[in-house]
Image: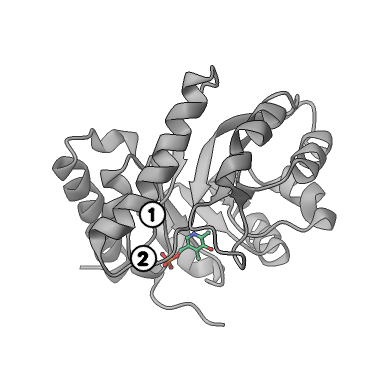
Amino acid sequence: MDIVKSTLQAVQERIAQAAQNAERDVNEITLLAVSKLQPVASVRALAEQGQHAFGESYVQESVAKIQALRDLALDWHFIGPIQRNKTAQIAAHFSWVHSVDRLLIAQRLSNERANHAAPLNICLQVNVSGEVSKSGVSMAEVPALARAVQNLPNLHLRGLMAIPRAEVDENKQRAQFALVRTRFEELNNMGLQLDTLSMGMSADLEAAIAEGATIVRVGTALFGKREG
Ligand SMILES: *Cc1c(COP(=O)(O)O)cnc(C)c1O
């Protein structure tokens, strides 16, 4: 069997199994294929197997890739750190941004999103492990940022994204995802209408799905090791 097809199926089966273990509907969970540092041909091969959503982290690389694959009408998600001088390109080329962690960036994305385009879907990146080196808004500051972002006209606040510290112990891994889920539920109890928990990568997607992930961001398990 074709290698691309079989790796995609293997990841889809992991997701289906994790959903079943959690007694969740697998259709609630979107596989985001993280194609950063992967060549256009690899993205095209995966798209030909029916994969529709792709995640990128580096603006320059991704804009070239998006343009080269324009014929496929793929769904592009920006998941990397955001520099303020790159927000216009992100607003122009992506339909989702998972890595918003401060108001200034959200305001720029809203101002730069074309008025005729659909609102840009936004997740707030939360620093769940509290590591100073990590990007993401602190857990305490999430509600205020969520309220402010929700009021920006060209954005649609969808939920939260997290990249917790890697844990060997699955219960510890789950505990971090559970903190994000609890925050998410608190925001909905405050009256926000969020539907997206972007959490889980190649190594920890099972733990994330057990705690309610609706988008898992998978790179290595689909494409193999990245260069660089
Ligand atoms: C690179 C990256 C991923 C994918 O990680 P893998 O371990 O290769 O699955 C997911 N999310 C973000 C934010 C990333 O930067």
Locate residue 142, reporting x and y percent: 60, 38
Residue 178 circle label: none
Locate residue 218, reporting x and y percent: 40, 59
Quarter of the rendering occupied by the C terminus: bottom right
Secondary structure beneath dot 2 equals helix
User: What's the distance in space between the residues labelled 1 and 2, CA to CA?
Assistant: 14 Å
Identified by mark 2, the residue type is Leu
Q: Is residue 194 visible?
A: no
Observer-nearest of 13 and 144: 144
Left or right, residue 189 beside residue 84: left
The residue lying at 28 percent from left, 53 percent from top is 207
Secondary structure beneath dot 1 equals loop
Residue 200 circle label: 1
- Number of numbered callouts drawn: 2
| Residues under numbered marks 1 and 2 in contact, where contact means CB atoms less than 8 Å apart | no
Left or right, residue 107 beside residue 74: right
Observer-nearest of 120 and 74: 120
Locate residue 208, reporting x and y percent: 33, 50
Identified by mark 1, the residue type is Gly
Left or right, residue 11 beside residue 161: left
Residue furthest to the top? 191
Q: Which residue is mark 2?
A: 222
The residue lying at 74 percent from left, 40 percent from top is 106
Q: Circle 2: is it few (<14), some (14-19), or many (20+) Cα within 10 Å?
A: many
Mark 1 residue CB less than 8 A from any atom of ligand 1:
no
* Visual colour scheme: one colour
Q: Quadrant of residue 96?
A: top right
The relative height of residue 98 versus residue 61 in the rendered view (above or below) is: above
Mark 2 residue CB less than 8 A from any atom of ligand 1:
yes
The relative height of residue 38 versus residue 59 in the rendered view (above or below) is: below
Q: Quadrant of residue 157?
A: top right
